[in-house]
Image: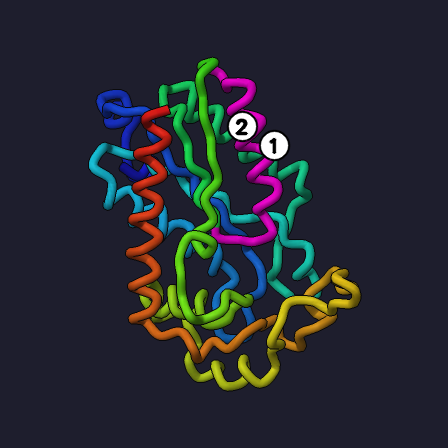
Amino acid sequence: MHLAEATWTDVADADGRLALLPTGSTEQHGPHAPLGTDSLAAEAVAAAGAEAHDEEVVVAPAVPVGVSEEHRAFPGTMWVSPDTFRAYVREAVESLATHGRDRVVLVNGHGGNVDALAEVAARVSRDGGPTGDAHVVAFTWFDAVDADVPMGHAGGRETALLRATEPDLVREDRVDAAREGGSDRWGEWVAGVNLAHDTDEFTDNGVIGDPAEGDAALGEAMLAAAGEELSDLLDALAER
């Protein structure tokens, strides 16, 4: 059940305690992929996880702006501070828990959100939320699947998932330019330290990796795998 499509009476009549809150970003993903790539991925994985699960799961609307200041040099990128992001996600989770959906998975599509989401999940779980018994965990889709293609940024994995779920949003005529202007690794490393704080310091067009490496078949396989992993996580969360 997606909350944005349900009525309040639908939710009141539904059984269960499980909910998914997708979190993403609105940030550059090279010249070929949309700014909403991470949010679209989080929503697709959340839907796949809910569909794969045997019990009814509430899917909340995605949080579309995340911790993305590292991409600030590229027009269209939006970001909020980690404090703002944590507060928003925590309060969104607490509103779900108030109405009985107190077993919540934060389904994440953006690497910059990871630390903040881990803190929110631990804080709400330790405090118990408004019900006194809430339990929250964070799930980042690209950490949960195996693929020969490196993650990167707007590279093979993310582009593959887009090709499987939102093919019309991939500017295929710009993929060659994305490859040529990208970087093969994240950051500028010396002695185990990343000297670069922002992505424009090491990639001309925002791409890390090769978007041509990921086709729709890979995207479909990763989506199915992530959905199954998320369903298993929901099982474990329900049993706690």
Which residue sits at x=36%, y=51%?
45
Q: Check disc 1 and report its element: helix, strand or loop.
A: helix
Q: Is residue 121 magenta?
A: yes
- Foreground residue among 139 and 58: 139
Q: Check disc 2 and report its element: helix, strand or loop.
A: helix
Location of residue 227 in the rendering, given as x and y in whole percent from the top left corner: 31, 50
Q: Give the range drawn in magenta.
A: 109-130
Q: Is residue 189 magenta?
A: no
- Foreground residue among 27 and 145: 145
Place residue 5 in its image quadrant. Answer: top left
Location of residue 19 in the rendering, given as x and y in whole percent from the top left corner: 36, 33
The residue labelled by disc 2 is 91
Residue extending farthest to the top is: 132
Which residue sits at x=29%, y=34%?
57
The amino acid type, in three-letter code, at marker 2 is Glu
- Foreground residue among 135 and 27: 135
Query: Up-down: is 180 above or below 141?
Result: below
In the rendered structure, are the residues bearing label 2 and label 1 in contact, judged by CB atoms less than 8 Å apart? yes
Place residue 208 in its image quadrant. Answer: bottom right
Q: In this view, does 109 lie to the left or right of 206?
A: left
Q: How crowded is mark 1: few (under 14 residues within 10 Å), some or many (20 or more)?
A: some
Location of residue 160 in the rendering, given as x and y in whole percent from the top left corner: 39, 69
Q: Is residue 128 left or right of residue 116?
A: left
Position of the N terminus, as image quadrant, is top left
The residue labelled by disc 1 is 87
